[in-house]
Each structure stands twice: as C-alpha cells, then as structure tokens.
Image: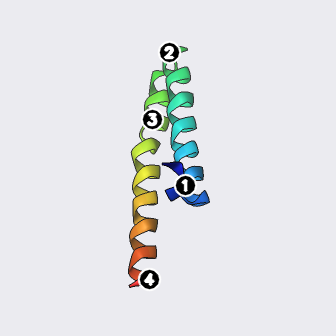
Amino acid sequence: MFKKFTITDKLLFVASFLSLMFSEILYFQGHKEDGTFIGIWVPSILAFGIYLKLINKSKND
C-alpha cells in the first residue's frame, strides 16, 4: 500500500502528524492558543500535498 507514496508524500504526512502531536502536547499542557494555532497547520500541510500531486499530474498529462 505504501509503495504508491513518493518520498514527498511521506515527508508531508510525517510533518502533518508531528504538527498534530505537537499541538496536542501544547494544548494539554495549558498552552491552548498555541496548540490551536499549530493544530491549524495540519490541514494546510495536507492541502499543500494535494496541490503538489495535482501539479505533478498536470505536468505528466
């Protein structure tokens, strides 16, 4: 299953996962605003990955 993913896909997934974990740690340590701010990065990172996939696909067509 993971053979379909490129190194860029894997790096973006790891970045979004680490962002999620870091935001939860901050949130539960009492830094609620900072945790929420970093938590907002997760969909942005994933959306950037989708954008890169679409650009790469359009170049190949």
On screen, residue 52 above or below 13: below
Crowd class of label 4 (few under 14; some 14 to 19; many from 20; radius 10 Å) = few
On screen, residue 52 above or below 9: below
Can you give x and y, in whole percent of width and height, for residue 17 in the image? 52, 37
Crowd class of label 2 (few under 14; some 14 to 19; many from 20; radius 10 Å) = few
The residue that mark 3 highlights is 39
- Please state, as top left, top right, bottom left or bottom right, where the C terminus lies in the image: bottom left
Q: Sequence order check: which comes first, mark 4 or mark 1?
A: 1
Can you give x and y, in whole percent of width and height, for residue 43 in the image? 39, 46
Which residue sits at x=50%, y=24%? Answer: 24
Mark 4: amino acid = Asn
Is the residue under label 1 in contact with that under label 4 (CB below 8 Å)? no
Is the residue under label 1 in contact with that under label 3 (CB below 8 Å)? no
Can you give x and y, in whole percent of width and height, for residue 57 in the image? 41, 75
SS class of the residue under badge 2?
helix
Q: Sequence order check: which comes first, mark 4 or mark 3?
A: 3
Mark 3: amino acid = Gly
Cα distance, mark 2 to mark 3? Answer: 12 Å
Q: How is the image coloured?
A: rainbow
Q: Sequence order check: which comes first, mark 2 or mark 1?
A: 1
Considering depth in this image, is 45 or 37 the residue closer to the camera?
Answer: 45
Q: Which mark is residue 3?
A: 1
Crowd class of label 3 (few under 14; some 14 to 19; many from 20; radius 10 Å) = many
In the drawing, does residue 22 fall left or right of residue 39? right
Mark 1: amino acid = Lys
Q: Quadrant of residue 19?
A: top right
SS class of the residue under badge 3?
helix
Q: Which mark is residue 28?
A: 2
The residue that mark 4 highlights is 60
* Comparing labels 4 and 2, the label whose residue is closer to the camera: 4
Cα distance, mark 3 to mark 1? Answer: 28 Å
Which residue sits at x=43%, y=66%? Answer: 53
